[in-house]
Image (spheres, rainbow, N blue to C red):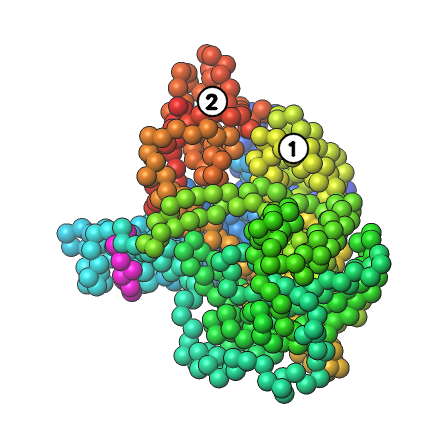
Amino acid sequence: MKSWKDRKQVILNLMKDDFYVPMKEKELAIMLQTDPEDRPQLKRALEELLAEGSIQISKRGKYTLSDPGSGKGGREVLRGTFIGHAKGFGFVEAEGDKEDLYIPEDKVNGALHLDEVEVVLLPSRSGRRQEAAVTKILKRGTETLVGTFQKSRHYGFVIPDNARLPFDVFIPEEDCHGAAEGHKVVVKLTDYGGSKEGMPGRNPQGVVLEILGHIHDPGVDILSIVRGYDLPTEFPEKVMRQAERIPDRVSEADRMGRSDLRQLTMVTIDGEDARDLDDAVSLEKEGELYHLGVHIADVANYVQENSALDREALKRGTSVYLADRVIPMLPHRLSNGICSLNAGVDRLAVSCLMTIDSKGEVLDYRLEETVICVRQRMTYTAVKKILEGDPREREGHGELIPMLEQMRDLAAILHKKRRKRGSIDFDFPETRLRLDEMGRPLEILPYERNLATGIIEEFMLIANETVAQHFYWLELPFVYRTHEVPEQEKMEKLASFIYTLGYPMKVRSKEIHPKEIQKLLGRIEGTPEEALISRLTLRSMKQAKYTVQQGAHFGLACEHYCHFTSPIRRYPDLLIHRIVKDWLRGRLHRMERYESFLPEAASASSRLERRAAEAERETIKLKKAEYMEAHLGEEYEGVISGVTQWGIYVELPNTVEGMVHVSRLPGDYFYYEEASHEMVGTHTDIRYKLGQTIRVMVAGADRGLRTVDFVIA
């Protein structure tokens, strides 16, 4: 056996050879004819050479001679955002790297969730992801947190609500500020604690800034999520003063220079509880041609660029729809007043007027600043009943019925065209909560799309696509909505999952086409596994985002797409309206301003959209757990929606998902069989697999953890 010094020199000599190409550890072992029992020594030699700075390792785990400027100890230094995990390890989203780096628990080195960190790659992999170690914390990402206060004799501590912060925060007695056992509090971190590599350190320390109330007080649960995600609840005084100065009606001066469409028959179609009505639709048919108008509230007319209102809207990015409240992007005076397309009153709009043939092709279109007057406010429920022939609902809507029926026909044409090109429609039920006046959940129902929601969806999609295509060909600065092709590895994993359920899917090519996913969803339509496979498929795809670089939208199978139709509740839509208006008015000199501002605004909007979505999901999970607390001991039939080594997840028809822990599976000792994605009984060969229908009993529910526990009934 070679000495350490000899082994290291052999490795260096190999890498100095002109014919050497970068290799992974396994390839080096083969090249150096290393016996299996000597592999640990080879690994140690590589680690020592890395530490000395003689060699370096790439993101793909390949070794080369060290570049003098490569970084610490010959290892490539990367920067990114640390994403914590409840079990102590984490991941780093490295800048410019598509795949996250895995940070083992003993290599976290004091980093907390959302910290900006510097990492170096490690030579070994425990799994399929490249491992790395945190070497430096560049910027803390968590300054305040929300948690539950627990009191000890001379001090307190706070258990964070966010499971990605797996520590308790120490609160000195003088910094408790009146907090008592069971209070939900906001804590400012004053000391982030410390740890040495491989050794746990002291806990972070903080001071109580705000007491939200007791964990059982009405509304405190949602308020904790609001504070935890740092969602702004109050508008600054300057913003409110500016909003108050905005008129509540359209003046004659406002109408000047606009196309007058007030005689055009148009309606809004929204949910019963909708308050901010920002889109109206009109339709006239001429022979085989449809003249579709999508009229969007001209919010940009009232929210001037760089005003207090505009800066606050950019800071919020989007309206947030929680279980018991809405946190709007704009003050109610705008979103429920002058910018809401209420029936019977004049409103300013930006209209996309399209001529569409019987095959769904947009033959002609124009964008205009308009003044409109909505004929009637309709609801999804009412329109659905009218189109289904309900005589009571049709009574009193006589003049609108022909237009609504033509809308149904055109929506079907547009939908057929989208399906033909491969556009994906996920048709699994979303959650609809019904709460009492105290915020307690009375009912959890699946919220499903219907004929009327489909009409509005198709009309908004075609308008968004038309506007995006228009500005792409003009080559002007713009904000696109893009959706990248899914990662091949995730698609292969999905295909493996669903194959066990009897549904094959082709994923051989380098890039999967959306048509393959569309075919899959068509095959599962109406089956017991539909909701499960739809969700698994959605989770395997990338998140859509805002970008100034035009890119295809994978889910919609289209080349050009944007968000133009909701400027009341989405900041990118407001930006697009400004660009449209500047182009219509010939103010192309302003485009230079957009060049510099749009990238930052698009990035911020994507980040704030994700924050809102996470907060919305957490409130739904919370209310589901609270609802199931009142149903302990009751039995339900559900479908197995997930199988892991620690248990099986079961989803009920009302969309509540809970877990049966592996230790509570009756009749045998069970283990997780990864190849078939099943939970298997050692002696009985009883199997639990995805999509299987089983009967469960509610064994527990935890609002704090937002989890539900089942046992097999």
Looking at the image, can residue 380 be seen?
no
In the displayed structure image, the side of residue 617 where residue 267 appears, left or right: right
Q: Amino acid at mark 1?
A: Ile
In the displayed structure image, the side of residue 294 where residue 121 appears, left or right: left
Q: Quadrant location of the C terminus?
A: top left
| Closer to us: 176 or 64 | 176
Mark number for residue 73? none
Asked whether residue 212 is drawn in magenta, I would say yes
Q: Amino acid at mark 2?
A: Tyr
Residue at point 46% right, 15% down?
682
| Closer to us: 638 or 345 | 345
Residue at point 52% right, 82% down?
247
Picture layout, residue 329 above or below residue 151: below
- CB of mark 2 within 8 Å of CB of mark 1? no
Q: Quadrant of residue 128?
A: top right
Q: Quickly name the residue at label 1.
A: 524
Please tell me whether mark 2 sits on a helix, a strand or a loop.
Answer: strand
Q: Quickly name the residue at label 2.
A: 671
Residue 313 in the image: state x and y as whole percent. Answer: 52, 71
Q: Main secondary structure of the magenta part?
A: strand
Picture layout, residue 479 above or below residue 413: below
Asked whether residue 308 is drawn in magenta, I would say no
Single out the residue that lies furthest toward the bottom. 253
Provide the residue span drawn in magenta.
208-215
Picture layout, residue 132 above or below residue 516: below
